[in-house]
Image (tube, rainbow, N blue to C red):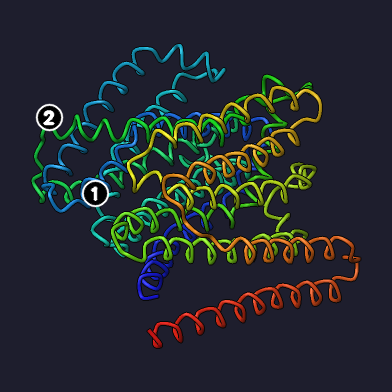
Amino acid sequence: MSQIKKLAGQTVIYGLSNMLGRFLNYLLVPLHTMVLGKFFYGQLTYIYSSTAILLVLLTYGMETGFFRFASKKEENYSKVLGTSLYSIIATTSIFLVFSILLKDLWQGYFEVQSSKIVIYFILIISLDVLNAIPFAKLRIDERPIKFMIIKLFGIFINIGLNLFYLMLCRKLSEAGGEGFLAKLYNQDLVLDYVLIANVISSAATFIILLPEIVKFKPTFDLSLLKRMLKYSFPILLIGLAGQFNDQIDKLLIPDLINDPNPVEQLGIYSANFKLSILMVLFIQMFRYAAEPFFFKNAESKDAKKLYADIMNYFIIFGLIIFLGVMFYIDILKYFIAEEFREGLFVIPILLIAKLIFGILFSLSIWYKVTDKTQYGIIVAVTGAVITILLNVILLPKIGYLGSALASLISYTVMLIVSYSLSIKHYLIKYNFKKISFYFILAFGLFVISRLLNSENSWMYYSFVTTMLIGFTGIAYLIEKKTLYNENKHRKQI
């Protein structure tokens, strides 16, 4: 249990940085949906979805490779760090140069009028890729506090600049001001302002992280790079397929949805996806802490039991978040502008899809610690193919509801495939009976909440709050009893 407590403690710290940062960025959603409108918000979603895929491609699994090799006692830490870093720097430099030379092609891809949008896009990707290994170093060194401070620093800069451009300058301009700040704002450049803020925050983060690497004097080893690339290449394919699975709906909606304003429909879908932010945050903070933690405990004799226990607790907290969001959705909906709220019906589907994705990530440890990452490729590619096919079939017929259903079905199939493969190679005995009980109980409470009359807000929120506390209490009592029995068994031994 001490190891689980350690993971929980690090998850909380990583969670504070990511949850606070994402929550602060989340507070920009009302501003972005109000100022950008459905069309520009749809364009922003398209750009960031493309960015997410390219980030995976340009880091090519080197983060996970760094964790794996840096955790090996026989490897030289300085060489692992330097080899990872210099490799990323070289490939990012090539991307930066060629992308600028071919910016007209990018401009045509995004269908934007200004080439400046493309330049901002290229800079954001390049800086974020360069920041990847320094942040990974902080994680493997178990320095979550510094990680949190640097992350939040960049986030505050981004938020501050968004508020500066889209609130201060906009208000001054709309009030008919003649000063520099009022003239700085142009409604046609709202997309530029959001991206400029991102560029500056990423650059500031890079500058702060730079001393962390320079003072360590990392070295490069070509033979080590070959071994790292051999390990990381399957991770690249897994990550790439995973990002396609996560982002392809947003890239396909403008082309396949049967609507006269497809980019606006993308904006609506994306804005409602943001209402599942608590689940996304929970999974993100878990991933930051769990991946290096899993590798460091891979050789422990109780590793499989540890992984099974972690999965159990992860599902409990994930279901609490699902219930919390759905019970209070009539309050949370005010975080997006009214014109976007027609898409609220997809939120429960997106929440469960994301929870299954988190379960899939926890389960995927079996092929990472056994170095059988080729099986991860099978899982990820299967999911990507299903997602693409279902989006192609469903988007023209039922709109972005088809994208939400495609994600849910795809992640579920990936989970089944991954577990089926793990049985032969690295069997972890998960408590399926208990996990099934938690899911059935949570879905039962969700259905009851949908049958209640929410017009009487006091009665409704009193009842759903009681149900949420009840679910949490039942899970606590069950887990407390399990832990007591385990401790009693150990003492008898």
Residue 174 in the image, given as x and y percentages of width and height? 63, 42
The one of 184 and 329 positioned closer to us in this rendering: 329
Say what secondary structure mark 1 lies in: helix
Q: Earlier in the sequence, mark 1 or mark 2?
A: 1
Relative height, residue 185 to residue 486 (above, below): above
Name the residue tied to disc 1.
209
Residue ID at (71%, 78%): 470
From the image, state whether disc 1 or disc 2 is nearer to you.
2
Q: Is residue 313 found left or right of 63 in the rendered image?
A: right
The one of 322 and 134 positioned closer to us in this rendering: 322
Residue 371 seen in the current view: yes
Relative height, residue 170 to residue 114 (above, below): below
Relative height, residue 474 to residue 268 (above, below): below
Residue ID at (56%, 30%): 384
Residue 320 in the image, given as x and y percentages of width and height? 64, 66
Q: Is residue 390 found left or right of 183 in the rendered image?
A: right
Residue 80 lies in quadrant: top left
Say what secondary structure mark 2 lies in: helix
Residue ID at (12%, 42%): 79
Q: Quadrant of the C terminus?
A: bottom left
Alpha-carbon distance for marks 1 and 2? 24 Å
Residue 410 in the image, given as x and y percentages of width and height? 63, 37
Residue 44 seen in the current view: no
Residue 439 lies in quadrant: bottom right
Name the residue tied to disc 2.
222
Residue 409 in the image, given as x and y percentages of width and height? 67, 39
